Image (spheres, rainbow, N blue to C red):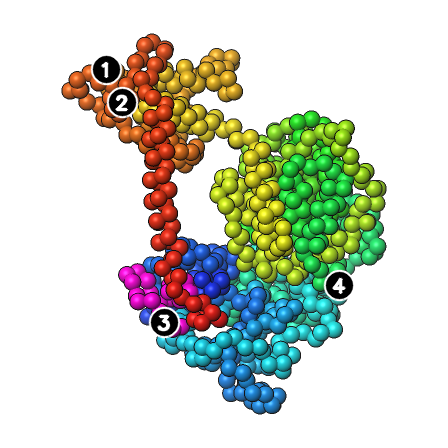
Amino acid sequence: MKNYPPPTEGENPILRAALQYAEAGRPVLPLHGIMEGRCTCGKPDCSSPGKHPTTPHGLKDATTDAAIIRGYLTGPAPLNVGLLTGGNFFVVDVDDPEKFEALRKKNCCEMKPTRTVKTAKGYHLYYKTPAGVRVKNRAGIADCFDVRGEGGYIVAAPSRHVSGAVYTASDKSPLADSPQWLLDLILPPKNKTEPSVATGLSTRYGQAALDDACRKVAAAGEGTRNATLNDEAFGIGQLIAGGEVDQAAANAALLDAAESCGLPQLEAKRTLKSAFKGGSKEPRKPEPRPPKAKLKTTGTCAPKKHTAENGQTAQQELEEGISSWVDPVVGAELADEVLATFTRHSVLPDGGEVAATLWTMGTFVFGAFRIFPKLLISSPERQCGKTTLLELLDALCNKALAASNATPSVIFRVIDQWQPTLLLDEADTFISENEELRGVVNSGHTRKTAFVLRTEGDGGNRAPKRFSTWAPMCIAMIKYPPDTILDRSVMLPMRRKLPTETVEAVPLEIWETCQSKRQKLARWALDAIEDLKVASPTIEATGTDRARDNWRPLFAIAEHLGGHWPESAKMAMETLEASKEPIADPGTMLLHDLRDIFAERGVDALPGYALVDALVDMEDRPWAEWKAGRPLTTTSIARLLKPYKVRPKQTWLNGGNQRAYRLEDLQDAFARYAPQCFPDLTARPLDPNNDGGSGLAPGNSQVLDGKNLALGISPSNTLKNVSDRRKASNHTGSSTLAVQTGKHWGGVNPDEELF
């Protein structure tokens, strides 16, 4: 690096370099550093000192956000910085310079100058990625260098090696094109289509098994990553010995998956070597499917008996996944085709066709995300198109499995076995009153916690077992869903079709005719998933934090597609989130109403009986018939506010002491659970020597007369005060933002400094 800005307090060279990388558009990742010759992770036997991420989700936590980067890298412990590779550049990590030089001479090639970073044992060569080519991570090429491309990262300058050496840019030339002989070693043969897991040397069964193993390894959480890799690699080792999987392909794919979940490379290599060796002692080939592998149901949860043109039945596609399209596909065009299928056969709410399309594509890449939302289809009455939409989703989604009723145990067992896209119809008949089932459904929202624990076996052989609940899920129901499910969903509020709204009927063979679309979606997923794993989409402050979490995967897909899709996703989110009714938790509802009462009246304290009168007068609220047809009481208010640490206090009101709720005591609860602008008034403490004033802010006099509350305050003055406060708040907020996002780096030329 060169031309560092002068050091400022709290900003070390690592932080400055990370901010420069981010300004050049390169996501960075905080890595553990070196202190007294040891990794700052604290493990005495750390296998990758100073090289593995400090964050819990590995590469998924990489970012270009300056404020987040400052949070990552500001602290007392020395840290290193990682740079995500892929996209338009890749890095050749030369571990043995002598062998690499011999290789260069053998190919009679002069190396063009390119950005080079000196490492402890060798150097990193940065190259442009050729147009139309995807360079993936590979290790041990020609026994002298590794490659870091899609889905990988590199320790970047000016990090420190465990030996004490500092990664230093020894050649700051612009990135050059890689010599052809080097690309020939790095890339697979051109006559082979490169699936996500490897080469064409694996059988279809072996490839499906390897795909599944990679998904499980990539989804492994901290504390289970190495064990998961060992278990999956052992099984793949058995298939390698049985001739079902190519070993080189398996090694590269599982190594990629291990690194994507944050497992250090050296540790992953050792585990793979040991597991492959163990598995090879027990060769395995696919066995005929036993009858018990089929779901035994009355028909409501059984896979379809269709057979597609490629010969796969619905059961085979559920178990193995669909075979992907051979040629690359254009994601935006494919998304438009899927959207057209939805609009041709169903009447959806505004934005619904966009949400349904992005969610459908997400079922093929949901493993790339930390959170994946449920798709909730709700209607006020029957015959609103829910089942029709489910038929279309069944024909388009990845490994779809439809059911009109299910128990908790069958749901987590089919998810653990197949990871299907679960489509639950008629959910209002079996999910609302079943707390255990709701718990299983809710658990599948966040990948790290998407598990349930049960015991298996008989008698003394019973043992605990963990079942995965991580899978896409669509729920269709009449009326409004339970709050906890709504909170985890993208909701499509369906309505009965008007006589003037005409659509084509869904053909009987829709599943078969959509087979090519599913194959293309599978191919798109193979090409896109590594980019989506590190995607950091921009989402404006629309809806709640949970709503933004739900939409983040869909925004990532939309940004990857490009074209009109990012803007369409934004408009869909704004429209659909606005159509959601607020979650009717009584405590939250009360806080919202109290916030409005205090803001409307412009006071800083109100007694309980005044709040009761104001609440009971609200026509669209349940307070007038709160319990057994009787209205809310002051005791009810106290009970509802107790969890928020809000209690009435003695306050000097209208010349006397009264127990009242003060705005200053409610401010924290308002900000956390009922956010909205309201006057920042400050209640005056009890003053027995007061001259008989109201105890309110000057100008906010009030007269309390029995149950009637008359306020002597001008609404226009209150609004003026709120407006002034908003302006002041906005001014302060923008200044803070300018500091946090590091705008003082505006003079840096990213192309000259980095790439």
Confirm or deny contact between disc 4 and disc 3 (CB under 8 A).
no
Q: Which mark is residue 656?
A: 1
Please state the total of marks drawn on the protein image.
4
Q: CA distance from mark 1 to mark 4?
A: 82 Å
Vertically, is 582 above or below 547?
Answer: above
- Which amino acid type corresponds to the residue marked 4 in the rendered image? Val
Magenta stretch, residue numbers: 1-20
What kind of element bears circle 4?
loop
Residue 11 on the magenta segment? yes
Question: Does the image show residue 141?
Answer: yes
Question: Nearer the observer, disc 4 or disc 3?
Answer: 3
Magenta: main secondary structure: loop
Earlier residue among tags 2 and 4:
4
The residue that appears at 84% across and 42% down in the rendered structure is 508
The residue that appears at 65% across and 44% down in the rendered structure is 354
Please tell me how crowded label 3 is: few (under 14), some (14-19), or many (20+) other residues with Cα within 10 Å. few
The residue that appears at 67% across and 46% down in the rendered structure is 357
Confirm or deny contact between disc 1 and disc 2 (CB under 8 A).
no
Earlier residue among tags 1 and 2:
1
Q: Which mark is residue 3?
A: 3
Vertically, is 34 above or below 473?
Answer: below
Q: CA distance from mark 3 to mark 1?
A: 68 Å
